[in-house]
Image: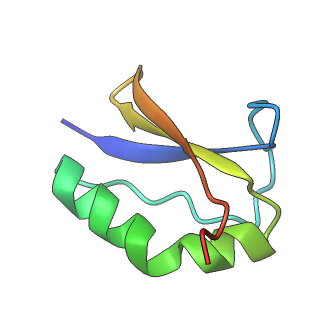
Amino acid sequence: MAWSWRYETEQGRPLEDGALPSEQFSSRGDAESWLGENWRELVEGGASRVTLIEEDRPVYSMSLDDPA
């Protein structure tokens, strides 16, 4: 299985910015760990939300707002 993140606007529309990374992961845990390490750079690149994708199926979405 392949896991990836879809980057989105605050309204949930997919970003089509080729400058954001298009990583593929072999497990959900790897994808989630990567997001935990890189979310600030995604926000700086224009992403407000992300959706975890397993193959072609959305698993869950979440905001990248900094809770601090």
Q: Does residue 6 appear in the picture of this structure? A: yes
Render colour scheme: rainbow
| In-image side of 13 versus 53 (left or right) | right
In-front residue for pair 64/24: 64
Residue 26 visible somewhere in the drawing: no
Q: Between residue 24 and residue 12, name the one nearer to us.
A: 12
Quadrant placement of the C terminus: bottom right
Q: Residue furthest front?
A: 68
Question: Residue 45, relative to residue 63: is it above or below?
Answer: below
For the point 33% across and 28% down, which residue is it? Answer: 55
Residue 63 placed where, x, y %?
Answer: 61, 49
Number of numbered markers: 0
Position of residue 62 measured from the top left corner of the image (x, y, whole percent)? 53, 43
Determine the residue positioned at 22% across, 62% down.
30
Tell me which corner region of the image, top left, top right, bottom left or bottom right, holds residue 60: top left
Quadrant, the N terminus: top left
Q: Is residue 63 above or below residue 18?
A: above
Instruction: Tell me the residue at 66%/68% (across/down).
Output: 42
Q: Residue 57's spot in the image, x, y percent? A: 39, 19
Q: Position of residue 45 (x, y in %)?
A: 79, 70
Q: Is residue 58 above or below residue 33?
A: above
Instruction: Identify the image quadrant of residue 18.
Output: bottom right
Corner quadrant of residue 33: bottom left
Q: Is residue 3 left or right of residue 36?
A: left
